[in-house]
Image (cartoon, grey):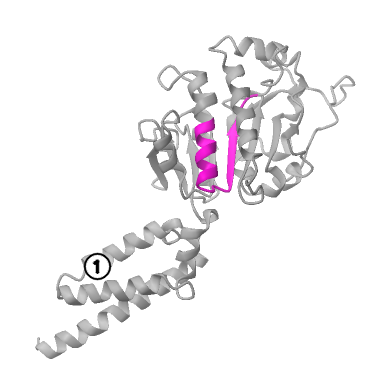
Amino acid sequence: RSISSYHDSAAMMPLLLFLLLVLLAAASSFTASPKWTTARNAHTATTTLFADLNEHSQFERRKLFFVVGAGMTGATLMPSLMANAADGNQGPITVIGANGKTGSECVGACLSRGIDVVATSRGGVYTGSYAASQSVRSSVCDVTMPDTVASAVRGSRAVIFAASASKAGGTPAMVDNVGLVNVAKACIEYKVPSLVIVSSGGVSRPDSPVYKFLNVFGKIMEEKIKGEDEVRGLYGAAGIDASTCTYTVIRPGGLTEEKARGVEYLELNQGDTKSGRIARADVAALCVQATMFPNLTGGTTFECYDADTAKPLQTVGLSNILKQTNKADDGDVFVSGKERRGKTFEEIFTGLEKA
């Protein structure tokens, strides 16, 4: 091969590769795959292309870096990649406590909707039910260590806090209270659009049997409500734009391992006066969907349960143990006046009162 032909092809290589990156960026606007819709992966793609240029001179590789780098900073030429770097809505949903049962279902709910998801845990390895999926990314996040929290939530479109106290993971005070507050502070600092918190029904009613029973375990209910209240205070502080950075507290009833029943079988309530049973998979669906309707769910706190298991908070514990359900002709079903039902998530979220 002649020297002149070599230099002619080398001179064209930067332009050709730059055009290729532009085409890839344009294609990202039409595909659901997250492969080309994050700035991180765009960088990976560029690195891979550079690896194929070993036959070219160092000078040519530097020239290519300059041309491609300049192109990637042009918003008019690379709109998708620039949007991904600047707009949190294009990032993943990060699940805190992904190795727990409810957290793992949140991972599954993201996958089933084609949403890029990062499954975090103290050890950094996701071992839940959906670990076989190549679409799941794992990351380290120990909620008691703010540095790991910051690196986990940065760049997320939303964060789901599904962590809770455990023998290996920390006490209720350190996880359900301080750990939650650490996550909320990081979400505010890095402008994560939506933080969804999995709490517990009955958490604001210390006189209820549910609260008294569960609070025996390390005062977990007491710590959960402290964490909730601190989060509300953080997001209510001056300077926080609720239209771009908000939170949602979800208080599920008794959790089951059953399959998801779907939104039309669920009921939401506010005021913590009513509860029931609900599948973890349905809680997960509510968590993920809540991130999609921040105008309806932002700044709200609500309880959730299967509508046909609804009971007053004072008697729901026994009803859940006996797996009782309400009959269509029951005339003594408790009504709080704040129930929400719907055939779609948007419909069931509509009308929630801001807390």
**50 within the magenta span:** no
Residue with the mark numbered 1? 50
Q: Could you tell me if residue 99 is visible in this image?
A: yes
- Rendering coords of residue 92 (x, y %): 48, 49
Residue 79 in the image: above or below residue 43: below
Q: Amino acid at mark 1?
A: Phe
Image point (46%, 19%), residue name:
166
**197 within the magenta span:** yes
Q: Quadrant of residue 203?
A: top right
Q: Residue furthest right?
A: 331
Q: Is 29 positioned to the left or the right of 131 in the image?
A: right
Image point (41%, 31%), residue name:
145
Q: Is 242 positioned to the left or the right of 12 in the image?
A: right
- Rendering coords of residue 62 (x, y %): 22, 73
Of residues 219 and 323, the one nearer the viewer is: 219
Image quarter where the C terminus lies is top right
Residue 141 in the image: above or below residue 325: below
Q: Quadrant of residue 16?
A: bottom left
Q: Residues within 10 Å of mark 1 (few under 14, many from 20)?
A: some
Image quarter where the N terminus lies is bottom left
Residue 5 in the image: above or below residue 354: below
- Rendering coords of residue 141 (x, y %): 41, 35
Of residues 3 and 323, the one nearer the viewer is: 3
Secondary structure beneath dot 1 equals helix
Q: Residue furthest front?
A: 238
| Part of the protein shown in magenta | 181-200
